[in-house]
Amino acid sequence: MVVADDSVLLREGLVRVLEEAGHEVVGAYGDADALLAAAPALEPDLAVLDVRMPPTFRDEGVRAAIRLRRELPRTGILLLSQYVEVAYAQELLGAGSGGVGYLLKDRVASLDDLTDAVDRIAAGGTVLDPEVVAQLIGRRHDPLASLTPREREVLQLMAEGRSNAAIARTLFIGIGAVEKNVTAIFAKLGLEDSGTDHRRVLAVVAWLQR
């Protein structure tokens, strides 16, 4: 794994937490350009990037993540941000492929939350911070209005990167019921099974674009 954050304390903290969880960190950088320069030779399984880094402290991490996915499509991406910035999450997920995540930096304080997110992203999953999802729920114009309350609950948990089994445990329902709701969500959003598209990610993108 590689890590990029301009804060020395947070960068070193991330490296320590990841290594304590059993992951190998092969590079830690203070800006996105340094990470992009080193990544082709390292071919990391996953890159953890701050959203805002030098020189402008605006969206360098997002730009680097998008470029990294283009050049090294097998590299998972985890973006970290101090605040909820839905547009950045939407831009990262817009390609419709898995292996991506967006977490608030507060989650880094929890070893379990961070390592769980890293493991799911490395396995090709999608992890979206619950705070981002909570903001999206409160938006007024909702193109997902056709979903039932249960389907919206299932989609919210899908947006957080939960598997069907995890959703079943959270909602205290059977896996069969979860699968039925997921199928209904895909149908209502017009997400046909083409055999290539990552429909769970596309459903999350639909959620973000409300």
Image (spheres, rainbow, N blue to C red):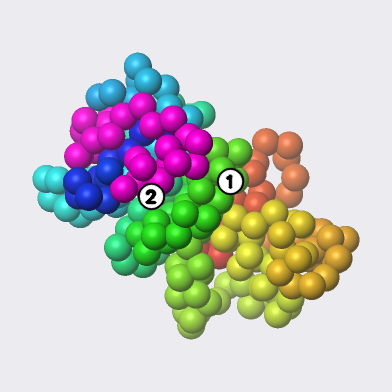
Residue nearer the viewer, 102 or 138:
102
At label 1, the amino acid type is Arg
Disc 1 on helix, strand or loop?
A: helix
Q: Residues within 10 Å of mark 2 (few under 14, many from 20)?
A: many
Horizontal and vertical percent position of residue 150: 74, 76
The N terminus appears in which quarter of the rendering? top left
Horizontal and vertical percent position of residue 123: 60, 38
Task: Out of 51 and 181, give the one closest to the viewer.
Answer: 51
Horizontal and vertical percent position of residue 184? 78, 64
Nearer the observer, disc 1 or disc 2?
Answer: 1
Q: Residue at x 42, y 22 (%)?
A: 43
Mark sitting on residue 120:
1
25 is within the stretch colored magenta: yes
Q: What residue is disc 2 on?
A: 79
Q: Calculate the distance from the C-alpha at mark 1 to the C-alpha at mark 2.
A: 14 Å
Q: Is residue 38 visible?
A: yes
Secondary element under disc 2, as helix, strand or loop, is strand
Provide the residue span drawn in magenta: 13-36
Left or right: 54, with 83 as reference point: left
In this view, the residue farthest toward the top is 41
Residue 148 is marked as: none
- Image point 47% across, 54% down: which residue? 111
Q: Is residue 90 visible?
A: no
Disc on the earlier residue, 1 or 2:
2
